[in-house]
Image (tube, rainbow, N blue to C red):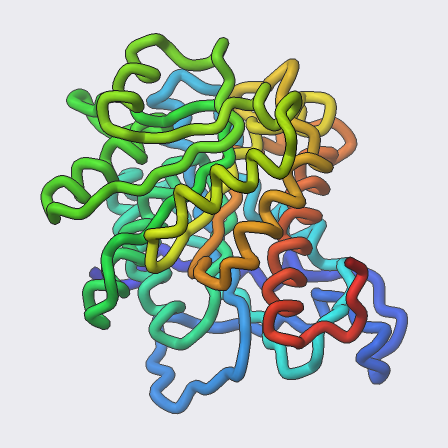
Amino acid sequence: MELKSYISAMEHWSGRVDSETDYDAFRWHQWVQPLDLTEEHDDFYCEYGFAFIGFCSEEGVERNNGRIGTAKAPNYIRGKLSNLPCVFEKTVKMYDTGNIVCDDISMEEGQKLLGKAVEKILEMGLFPIVLGGGHETTFGHFLGQFADLKKNGKPLDMGIVNFDAHFDLRPYENGPTSGSMFRQIADIYKTEDISYCYLPIGIQQNSNTVSLFKYAQSNDINYILAKEIQNVNFAQVLSRIDTELFNCSSTYMTICADVFSSAFAPGVSATQAVGLEPEAVLPIIKHILRTKNVRGFDLCEISPRFDHDDATVKLGAVIIFTVVNTLCKLNNLLVIDFD
């Protein structure tokens, strides 16, 4: 499948300019370069870099009877990323590969296109950061990650960490939604006869049916409840994560913004009155990244139309800032280390 429905998003990278020559005063919008995935890049080389791609989809949310609005999130997120400071070395490159827009194609077609884009980003040696979109974004991202592993003969036992109030393990006999992705992935793993390592973190008891809890238990899916992060010893939570990911050759991380309390993330499809606080989640994200096995990241379910003072979009930008800088730190590529 060709990478059609690709639209440049460089105009959304704009902001304050403190200096046009002093890199120490640069912000992300001054460092991000366009990268057209529809072209050949045989001579492309990057010592270390990130590639952003937006998935402008909300069909999965609509099918799941959620509040639509997530299709506009990628460009809003870019706007908040723009003024972040470049605290990494110049050798770190940032590319924007544009948006996959699903207005005139089905969600399933869009997911296949996203998979192809992620596969090409990985092929170029870049770390993919996918800006959702509804959480159906994850299935497209997964398709690209899985295809890359297969193509390069790497172990397929990729662990999946999902920060989310919901399991997203719903049946999909009547068609996939933003709540079925991890069941779809589970079925792919079964077909390939691979152990499925799926770790949802932040699960809310009041947001999931008994049927979903039973499905998780019967399929050996371990999970961490939101209340465990809020009330249990933090070291114990990290130990459980380490145990779960120990046997995975690689890991892919996704965040659904509804894992956070509505006090911090009002602009989501399904708000959480007693969700997690960012201060509790960010250290866990850093801990998982420190395994050095994470090969991709996406942020989903931000709905700007329901946001207040861009609080949720700003939180999303802080999360991505944390991901980028933690990975740069692991590669000794930070100019200033704040930890």
Front position in the image: 178 or 231: 231
> Which residue, as the protein is rendered here, is positioned at the far bottom?
43
Above or below, 182 relative to 67: below
Residue 196 or residue 88, whichever sits in front? 196
Percent x, y of residue 339: 77, 58
Which of the 4 image quadrants contains residue 316? top right
Q: Is residue 101 left or right of residue 271?
A: left
Look at the image and tell me in which quarter the N terminus lies.
Answer: bottom left
Q: Position of residue 35 (x, y in %)?
A: 48, 73
**Residue drawn at x 30%, y 23% as measured from the top left:** 216
**Could you tell me which residue is drawn at 51 percent across and 35 percent down?**
163
For the point 27% across and 65% down, the residue is 148
Q: Nearer the viewer, residue 3 or 279?
A: 279
Compared with residue 285, is residue 145 higher up or lower down, i.e. above or below?
A: below
Viewer-closest of 170 and 9:
170
The quarter holding residue 284 reads: top right
Report whether 7 appears left or right of 48.
Answer: left
Is 80 situated left or right of 5 in this image? right
